[in-house]
Image (cartoon, rainbow, N blue to C red):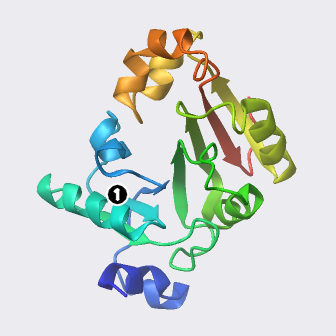
Amino acid sequence: MTEFENRLNQTSSERKELPQPGYIFVEIGPYASLSVPMAGSKKFEEGSFYIAVEKDHKIAKRTERDFKLEALQNFHVIPGDAGKMPFLGNHTVDEVFLGNVVGDPGVHNHIKIFEEIKRILKPGGKLVIKETTTPDTVNLHTIEYILKNEGFTIIKASRPTDGSWESDVNPYDILSAKNKSNLISDDYRKESYILFATLGLTAN
């Protein structure tokens, strides 16, 4: 277990003696150069933490290597299963991002993953789901239904045909934001979507 994982595993009383991290962003299933820090425009302010959770150890090592090459600070890669993240405490995370994860044919238990996300997110925390590779595998309607049953509130969802697509997607994936015409013209990917949900709040 790394020093960072030990830090995350400490009890609340133990953490009181240590400086508290700022914004905590968790990406589930990153893929090296396609991860948010590498592919998106999102800025991580000083004091914030980016945590990548990847069950494939080879991909986790490749992602960690890319972060080191870019000399990124407070960017951590933890090999692990998104359905069980004991290294993250209850209600400690500000934002969780899943990019092309829920449509992955290798992901079977979506309910377990969303239950774990619900455990780690702070009240009012944000969940973002982007699907541009296999959006028809688990479509937007299905994901909305699952999330509502799990107690999430859908804030917004957009597709490549919507005017807000570029601004919605750009922080997480600049290429998909700019190449929306390619998504629309591709029968397999024309149902691409990005969804924003929250926990413990009612959408306006």
**Which residue occupies the foreground of this view, 82 or 184?**
184
Tell me the residue at 32%/37% (across/down). Answer: 39
Label 1 SS: loop
Question: Image quadrant of residue 48?
Answer: bottom left
Q: Residue at x 40, y 16 (%)?
A: 179
| Callout 1 amino acid | Ser
Whether 122 is drawn above or below 33: the answer is: below
Residue closer to the observer: 83 or 124: 83
Q: In the rendered view, does 76 fall on the left or right side of 128?
A: left
> Label 1: which residue?
48
Q: Is residue 26 positioned above or below 87 on the image?
A: above
Left or right of 69 in this view: 59:
right
Say which residue appears at 57% left-offset and 79% top-offset: 86
Between 94 and 143, the one nearer to me in the picture: 143
- In the image, residue 6 above or below residue 114: below
- Residue 158: x and y in percent read 62, 21
All told, the count of numbered labels is 1
Q: Is residue 202 visible?
A: no
